[in-house]
Amino acid sequence: MPILTAAVLAAFAGYSAAWYMGFLEGNFALLLFLATLVTGFYWVAERFWFLPQRRRGAEAVAVQAHERRTQLAAQGIAQVDGPDVEQTRQKLLMQPWWLDWTAGLFPVILAVFVLRSFLFEPFKIPSGSMIPTLLVGDLILVNKFTYGLRLPVINTRLTEGKPPARGDVMVFRYPPKPSLDYIKRVVGVPGDEIAYLNKRLTINGQPLPKQALPDFFDEDSMRYSRQFAESMGERAYRVLNDEDRPAFIPGAEDFPFKENCRYSVEGVVCKVPQGHYFMMGDNRDNSLDSRFWGFVPDRNIVGKAFFIWMNFGDLRRIGSFQ
């Protein structure tokens, strides 16, 4: 068992190292699921097999020592030489390293697995597509149960939950490459007609209220962008526009239901199909979103982003957001 366990741990370490160094595309959900299964197997084996064996061995040592002392006492020998019985028992009861690194870690790994899969999952914002709502380096929490509980790894829905609403900031699996997680704002739900023409967002023929704000200065790019307050129902948030970028959508890919979209020099108009959502970044001219790669199917939903729990460069960022 020690050799087998060493091989299993080496495989996990090798996979993690190859992922970290970019030699392969990792899947943390799958890795955590496998770690939970493996350590759970060792935990069960420890509880019902290995630990009882060690206890029987320690009990046998204590019984043998007692019998020896009784025999020597019958012969009138009170002083008994030999190894410390209690120390020997403790060594026999001690968990070996290969169980310490598997069964011993199972409760922690199980807690992380349940928390991450069904309650809250942490993410780090890697790009500026959601500026000014979310900045590069923000560490956020995603609610995994608002839109319904899903099985980890395969993402099959277990409960219905609430459907995504316009204005929600949502994490989802990137449709062209589902191994990647993206974060954008929901602007269109099934049945909506979304128009983004001349940098103005319209939903079902109604332009969204948009009010000019002072320009936004991006410290990373060292540039100013036009900033606006936009509202979607009762939800208000800020968006950015780059005056140097054209209104038309360059390089739109082929995607399912592309026939629902009409592209022009002014922008794009799309009818959202059933079971899909239209997503856009708040940094409107610096976001690769549904305008370019299409609609997000319901099966790709990961959860609703709702809280910034840390930004090491600016602790004032901590808090909820719209």
Image: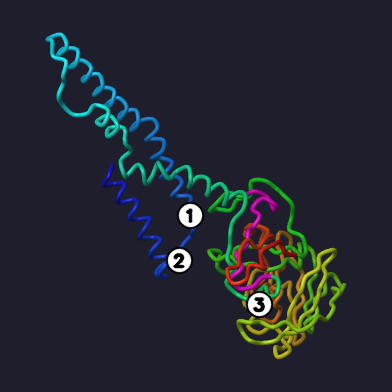
Q: Amino acid at mark 2?
A: Glu
Q: Quadrant of the N terminus?
A: top left
Query: Is 297 in front, or is 125?
Result: 125
Q: Do callouts 1 and 3 mark residues in contact (Cβ within 8 Å)?
A: no
Residue placed under numbered mark 2 in the picture: 25
Category of crowding for the residue at label 1, using alpha-carbon neighbours closer than 10 angstroms: few (below 14), some (14–19), many (at least 20): few
Category of crowding for the residue at label 3, using alpha-carbon neighbours closer than 10 angstroms: few (below 14), some (14–19), many (at least 20): some
Tell which circle, 3 or 2, labels the residue nearer the N-terminal end: 2
Q: Do callouts 1 and 2 mark residues in contact (Cβ within 8 Å)?
A: no
Q: Amino acid at mark 3?
A: Ser
User: Which residue lies at the image location 50% right of the left edge and 45% below the top edge?
Assistant: 110
Asked which secondary structure carries label 3, the reply is loop
Q: Amino acid at mark 1?
A: Leu
The residues tagged by marks 1 and 2 sit, at their Cα atoms, a distance apart of 12 Å
Query: Residue 109: x, y in percent?
Result: 48, 47
User: Which residue lies at the image location 44% right of the left edge and 49% below the top edge?
Assistant: 35
Q: Is residue 244 visible?
A: yes
Residue placed under numbered mark 3 in the picture: 287
* Residue lying furthest bottom: 244
